[in-house]
Image (tube, rainbow, N blue to C red):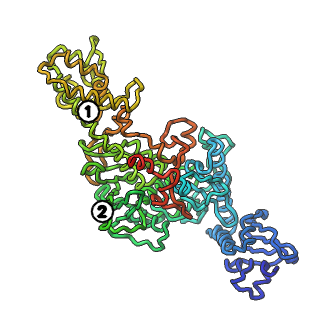
């Protein structure tokens, strides 16, 4: 049916139900005509034209695109669309070509702008290849860590695309939790966060390069960073335009991040003052749109529910909490980011990734799930509250005690999230800060992390009283056996004959200690015990005994200590009996606190403090209780190739073989769903749950 592909068909009254190339061209207000041989159909404009080649039987042979002053180049993507009779996609390509030249000025000026875009594309392509060669980076690693992400070349009317961020739930298989084998050819271009690279007219004039700026093919460092030639009048021209990174979807940015991007490029992100809103409201609306809500309405209560295996959560997102100057965290939707030099792209993408990581964590609490709280007595309540533009707190009831605890999460960048647990001095241990940090970096989900914290607390709940008994017993022994400061024996405990400190008691050697004011509670620099021991930092023993042996040994020591008669004398010989015991000696090496600092005041950044869990992680018995090894239970979320190259031991590079389960969607998979978490071979947190039940 030659008329289906010819312009003659439209002149004979072809209707849109059977569209033709000529009809599609006229819909875009483009010219069209047939060649004398009737085997070529042309769609033309002042700046480009499209050739559709047919054979004598009317079958499609090729589709070529030619820009002003260039030779026609075959476009396989357009060929495939016409062969599949996918006229909608073919029309989108034509529309993209038309929009590419919606620029101010005459054809000569538009040609210069097109040359500038072409030069930028060549530089960006070279930057990606230099990174991949230097780092031997895979497709996902290139997206997460590459200076320009994963670049997809311009094809027909589709602009150059830079894919720069994907969440763990985007890259792991549903159910099994195994990493998806993504390559450049099969990874969906709509997955995660990506930007399009284009040039557009502006009210101001900027100097843009019209020739590639990268000199040579050798990077200046081990990351594949290129060397750029200087901007001169010979390789740049002044144009009423600049380059833009256009978001694939409008993305919420905090006001401070918007200002950072403007400072990098020297060009304001918004030509006029943007409409500011609560950043959390913008993130919630954006997340609901991704989950399929056409016109997402905000629930005034800002409460969202998550159903996980064995747990049901309710999250209150307190986005109106004052952050600074009594104002809440403000943000704006960003559609495009202007810039004028290829060297600015990596820094801009890092800011986009940083904001995307923050949005991913907050968005993980936003679900369309509805739960009747009256029918759910075991519903766990959480409050998420912003602290800064890159940190927030999650407050909840202690899993063991009836008190409030708080986890502060600081999104350092898209690759690092630092977490710290704050609880009362008398609260039972839950888990270490390092455990929480590793879980968050592997799943980037608040509900999954909160579930893991609770499961970890349940595994050590039964053993927690033993820790309190140890501390109480040591305190009693010290009180009963401590000689007065005037006794010669006191000096013999803390220091040797030469003034050394054989058992490592801080503050008793007479000199200043490295811990300074943070030394032992009750062991001051004056050399006197001023109160009961309430904190300790337990060091690992060197014998290499098993954790169970250590537990049994401690139990035996406790029993023997309880059977000792009360001593009436404070002689140095009696006290030395305590110090000669290796278990008690290790308990006396005090540098931290059993319980960490009390929870911070609402809406205030908690002061830095020593984590109680981290102070005990070197002791074999407590390590057995804490089991501080989430890498065995949680999947790795894409470590940086540079981390592996430098062997830095980053938490993101541990346990490469593990995976994080999740549910797979068309564009972005939901986080923390019951289906996604109950994978058959790697469900998040299932290992802890099964251990507790058995």
Q: Is residue 124 above or below residue 490?
A: below
Identified at 56% across, 40% down, the residue is 642
Pinpoint residue 486: horizontal percent, then vertical percent.
14, 17
Quadrant of residue 275 within the rendered picture: bottom left
Q: Secondary structure at mark 1?
A: helix
How packed mark 1 is, by other alpha carbons closer than 10 Å (few <14, some 14-19, many 20 or more), is some
Instruction: State the separation of the CA atoms marked 1 and 2.
Output: 36 Å
Q: Are marks 1 and 2 in contact (CB under 8 Å)?
A: no
Q: Secondary structure at mark 2?
A: loop
Identified at 32% across, 67% down, the residue is 375
Pinpoint residue 502: horizontal percent, then vertical percent.
31, 18
Can the viewer see residue 510? Answer: no
Left or right: 413 with respect to 137? Answer: left
Q: Quadrant of the N terminus?
A: bottom right
Mark 1 or mark 2: name the one nearer the start of the chain.
2
Can the viewer see residue 672? Answer: yes
**In-front residue for pair 633/598:** 633
**In-front residue for pair 380/335:** 380
Pinpoint residue 357: horizontal percent, then vertical percent.
47, 54
Pinpoint residue 672: horizontal percent, then vertical percent.
45, 58
Identified at 56% across, 48% down, the residue is 145
Residue picked out by circle 1: 470
How packed mark 2 is, by other alpha carbons closer than 10 Å (few <14, some 14-19, many 20 or more), is few
Residue picked out by circle 2: 377
């Amino acid at each position: 049916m030659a008329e289906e592909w010819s312009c003659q068909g439209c002149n004979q009254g072809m209707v849109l139900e059977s569209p033709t190339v000529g009809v599609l061209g006229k819909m875009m207000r483009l010219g069209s005509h047939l060649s004398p041989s009737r085997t070529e159909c042309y769609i033309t404009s002042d700046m480009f034209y499209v050739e559709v080649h047919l054979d004598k039987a009317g079958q499609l042979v090729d589709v070529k695109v030619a820009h002003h002053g260039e030779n026609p180049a075959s476009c396989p993507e357009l060929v495939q669309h016409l062969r599949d009779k996918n006229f909608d996609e073919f029309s989108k390509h034509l529309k993209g070509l038309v929009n590419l030249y919606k620029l101010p000025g005459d054809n000569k000026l538009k040609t210069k702008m097109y040359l500038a875009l072409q030069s930028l594309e060549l530089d960006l392509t070279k930057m990606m290849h230099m990174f991949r060669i230097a780092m031997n980076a895979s497709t996902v690693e290139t997206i997460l860590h590459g200076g320009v992400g994963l670049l997809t070349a311009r094809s027909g009317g589709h602009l150059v695309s830079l894919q720069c961020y994907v969440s763990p739930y985007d890259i792991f298989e549903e159910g099994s939790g195994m990493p998806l084998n993504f390559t450049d050819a099969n990874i969906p271009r709509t997955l995660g966060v990506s930007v399009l690279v284009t040039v557009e007219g502006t009210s101001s004039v900027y100097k843009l390069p019209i020739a590639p700026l990268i000199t040579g093919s050798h990077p200046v460092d081990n990351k594949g960073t290129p060397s750029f030639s200087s901007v001169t009048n010979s390789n740049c021209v002044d144009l009423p335009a600049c380059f833009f990174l256009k978001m694939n979807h409008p993305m919420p940015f905090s006001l401070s991040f918007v200002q950072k991007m403007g400072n990098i490029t020297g060009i304001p992100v918004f030509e006029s003052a943007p409409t500011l809103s609560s950043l959390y409201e913008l993130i919630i609306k954006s997340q609901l749109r991704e989950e399929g809500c056409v016109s997402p309405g905000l629930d005034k209560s800002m409460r969202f529910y998550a159903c996980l295996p064995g747990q049901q959560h309710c999250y209150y997102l307190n986005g109106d909490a004052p952050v600074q100057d009594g104002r809440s965290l403000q943000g704006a939707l960003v559609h495009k980011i202007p810039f004028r030099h290829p060297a600015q792209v990596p820094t801009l993408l890092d800011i986009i990734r940083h904001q995307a990581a923050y949005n991913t964590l907050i968005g993980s609490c936003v679900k369309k799930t509805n739960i009747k709280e009256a029918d759910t007595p075991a519903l766990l309540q959480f409050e998420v509250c912003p602290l800064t533009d890159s940190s927030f707190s999650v407050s909840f009831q202690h899993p063991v005690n009836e008190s409030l605890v708080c986890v502060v999460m600081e999104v350092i960048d898209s690759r690092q999230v630092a977490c710290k647990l704050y609880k009362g001095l008398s609260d039972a241990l839950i888990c270490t800060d390092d455990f929480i940090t590793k879980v968050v970096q592997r799943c980037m989900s608040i509900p999954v992390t909160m579930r893991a914290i609770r499961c970890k607390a349940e595994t050590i709940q039964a053993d927690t009283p033993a820790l309190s008994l140890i501390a109480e017993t040591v305190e009693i022994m010290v009180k009963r056996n401590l000689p007065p400061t005037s006794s010669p024996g006191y000096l013999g405990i803390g220091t040797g004959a030469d003034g050394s400190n054989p058992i490592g008691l801080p503050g008793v050697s007479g000199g200043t200690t490295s811990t300074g004011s943070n030394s032992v509670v009750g062991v001051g620099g004056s050399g006197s015990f001023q109160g009961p021991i309430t904190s300790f930092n337990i060091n690992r023993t060197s014998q290499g005994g098993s954790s169970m042996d250590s537990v049994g040994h401690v139990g035996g020591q406790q029993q023997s200590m309880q059977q000792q008669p009360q001593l009436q004398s404070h002689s140095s010989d009696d006290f030395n009996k305590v110090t000669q015991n290796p278990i008690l000696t290790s308990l006396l090496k005090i540098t931290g606190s059993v319980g960490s600092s009390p929870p911070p005041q609402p809406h205030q950044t908690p002061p830095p403090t020593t984590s109680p869990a981290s102070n005990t992680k070197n002791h074999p018995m407590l390590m057995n209780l804490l089991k501080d090894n989430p890498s065995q239970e949680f999947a790795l979320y894409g470590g940086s190739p540079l981390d592996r190259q430098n062997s830095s031991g980053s938490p993101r590079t541990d346990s490469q073989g593990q995976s994080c389960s999740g549910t797979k969607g068309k564009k972005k998979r939901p986080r923390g769903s019951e289906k996604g978490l109950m994978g058959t071979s790697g469900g998040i947190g299932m290992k802890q749950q099964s251990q507790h039940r058995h």
